[in-house]
Amino acid sequence: MKEIKIFSPASIANLSCGFDILGLCLNDIGDEIIVRKTKEKGIKILKVTGQKLTLDVNRNVAGVSALALLRETNVDCGFEIEIHKGIKPGSGIGSSAASSAGSVFAINELIGKPYSNKELIKFAMEGEKIASGSAHADNVTAVLLGGFTFVRDGLSFDVFKLNNPIELAFTILHPQIELKTSESRELIPKNVSLEKMITQSANLGAFISGLYTEDYDLISRSIKDVVIEPLRSILIPEFETLKEISLSNNALGFGISGSGPSVFALSKGLINAKKIGDLLKNKYKKTGIPFDIHTSNINEKGIKIITTK
């Protein structure tokens, strides 16, 4: 194999009650990445379409993660990368994670898969570190493993998949304003009260239990954020209104996707997710702010190979 084209999907991190712990892989929204073997060693980024991003391999997240992989891998060739962005940077649905994870996944396939997808996480996290200032694993874990994922310890790459209730579906509204992860993280309190810690921990445990028992009422009661959302939501226009519309129309939950500005509504069934999407669309048109709406069920597989040569 000399060339591979992959689809690297968008993702939702945090899922309200699991800051830097929970992740979820989405369908149909994402980047397409082409990687080719070259005789000249090293990494080159030839092209980026869809967004204005640097071709400098030391500053582009796909290049940074790829270089991290090559530092630990003996190969007698190099690689050139083309990135066709389907996710806007700063959108809150894992733009940097899609590129970071996608480049190392593709290179790993071209060199005979010496690493498992789980082992690729540590390389992809180097790209995330450049993008947000911290090497968090929640988005890249979801992209590489698929489905719902849990990060017990990002430093030791102790991560795993969770059960995926088949009826869950997401509505994502992306206001086209940029909210950088590094800036959004500055709003997070350094200390949290014992009361909030107990509430957030209880919600996280109950949410995971709800995933395994497929108890949609428990999932709905648990997908709540008492620590981060009250601070970050003020940066997202009409957040409370969108939340009210979603919850009053049978959404199981509503929250900020990653660091924002995208928001998500969680529903039982894709039909209800699309209905909520229409309602949110009608409301947000009145703001005059450009936006995108996506509906998605859960991508259980993660990154997909499109073609090989």
Image (cartoon, rainbow, N blue to C red):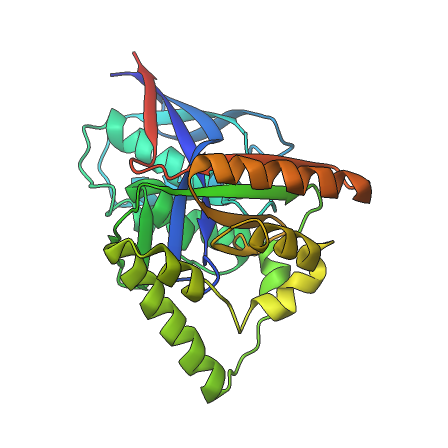
Where 306 falls versus 295 (above or below)? above
* Along the line of sight, the residue nearer the viewer: 22 or 131: 22
Vertical arrangement, residue 86 with respect to residue 149, above or below: above
User: Where 41 falls versus 247 (above or below)?
Assistant: above
Which residue sits at x=47%, y=49%?
266
Q: Is residue 65 in view from this perspective?
A: yes
Left or right of 61 in this view: 219: left
Residue visible at 43% across and 59% down?
A: 220
Where in the figure is residue 248, as x and y percent of width and height?
59, 54
User: Quadrant of residue 43 in the image?
Assistant: top left
Q: Nearer the viewer, residue 72 or 283?
A: 283
Q: Nearer the viewer, residue 157 or 292?
A: 292
Q: Residue at x 78, y 41 (%)?
A: 289
Image vertical order of residue 38 relative to residue 133, above or below: above
Q: Residue at x 47, y 43 (%)?
A: 170
Q: In the orientation shown, which residue stands out farthest toward the top?
A: 309
Q: Is residue 38 visible?
A: no
